Every structure is written in C-alpha cells, then in structure tokens.
Image (spheres, helix red, strand yellow):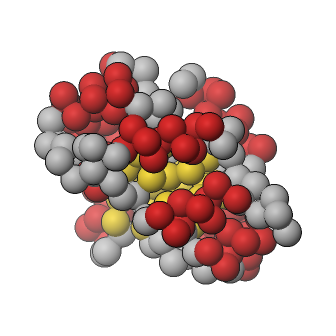
Amino acid sequence: MERTRFYELLDACPVIAAAKNEESLRHSLDADCRVVFVLYGNVANIPEIVARIDEAGKTPVVHIDLVDGLAAREPAVDYIRLRTAAAGIISTKGVLLKRAREVGLIAIQRFFLLDSMALTNIEKQVKANQPDLIEVIPGAMPKVIRGLAQGLALPVIAGGLIRDREDAENALHAGAKAISCSSAEFLSHFSSHS
C-alpha cells in the first residue's frame, strides 16, 4: 500500500482497532475504523486473520513480532507480503522495518516509552530504520506526543492505555495522526451496529 493512501485512511478515521485475540477481532470488524492492527496469531492462521479483516473492507497491519512461528528475520516479512493481504507491519526491529519498505509494505516502528532514555533514542532509531510511521506506547501522554509530532518528520500513532474518548482526543489534539485501541468498550462507540 502506498504511504499516502495509508495516511488518507488515518485522516478519514484516526481510530485504529487493535485485535489481540478472536474476541477483540470481532469488535474490530464491527467498529467503523478503517485500519486494524493484528496483535496475535501464528504462522498457520495469520493469513486467515488478515483475510477476514480485508474481506470486511478494512486495512490489516500485522504486528510481526507477535506472530508465533515467525523469526525476526527478513523472510518473515516476505511471508507476510506474499501469503497475506496485510498492508503493512508493526515491529520494534529495524531489519524487519527496512525489509517491509523494500517489499512495499507500510512500516510502523513501535516504541515503548519507559523513561527519558527511551524517548531520546527515538530520533536515532527513526533515522536508522526509516519507518513510515511510529507508534508510541503508552499513548496517554499528550505532552510527549506533542514533542514527538513536532520534532519528527513522520506521523505518530498513540497506542496503549487509551481507554476513553478523552484519552483519544487528548492524543489527537497533541498531534497524533491516529490512536490504536483494543478496548471493546471504546471501540463500541465506533461500531457500525450502534
């Protein structure tokens, strides 16, 4: 998928459903979001999980580090590209992100912001790995998100600990391009069946 097209999907709906199991996948498919992050699966069932999302008219992105049976090597990215309808991957590993971009997948680098050293390290990692977007966890940190959104030349997704509309709005107002959330209660507000 083209980076510009992916950004347009996030502009149209900045809520990304994050499916961490079968139940949250069902909520994700019912939500009026355009993008679904897949945070579970294994080498045998990931093609089917991604196909269900694609068939629902949504854009699947696989957190490749969480797929059981795939090693943190370039052939894992090739597998996702050739065997699934995923538009992109999420990873903490630079080699996987670089390969994703080489084969035409959206590359989202996930950062866990545990302390100021982790925050300082982001710019260096972004330069080295050249992802299309970054996801920061936890996402309920407007001040940090604002600094990242202003300081980096790529979009920021806020994820983790987004529990309600206020958290989402704070992250978006701080400059996040989108928020990712696995909370069924939160996603129910974006359900096409509501």
Q: In the depicted view, which residue is nearer to us: 88 or 147?
A: 88
Q: Residue at x 34, y 66 (%)?
A: 112
Q: Residue at x 51, y 38 (%)?
A: 51
Quarter residue 121 falls in: bottom left
Quarter residue 1 falls in: top right
Q: Position of residue 106 (x, y in %)?
A: 46, 32
Left or right: residue 113 compared with residue 162: left
Q: In the depicted view, which residue is nearer to us: 97 or 45?
A: 45
Asked whether residue 27 is in view, the answer is yes
Q: Position of residue 190 (x, y in %)?
A: 77, 64
Quarter residue 155 falls in: top right
Up-down: is 23 above or below 42?
below
Q: Residue at x 36, y 44 (%)?
A: 46
Q: In the depicted view, which residue is nearer to us: 62 or 177?
A: 62
Q: In the depicted view, which residue is nearer to us: 52 or 155?
A: 52
Left or right: residue 131 compared with residue 97: right
Left or right: residue 76 compared with residue 29: left
Up-down: is 54 above or below 105?
below
Asked whether residue 146 is in view, the answer is no
Q: Residue at x 74, y 50 (%)?
A: 13
The outermost residue toward the right is 194
Q: Position of residue 128 (x, y in %)?
A: 27, 36
Label tally: 0
Q: Quadrant of the C terminus?
A: bottom right
Left or right: residue 169 compared with residue 20: right
Q: Position of residue 20 (x, y in %)?
A: 43, 65
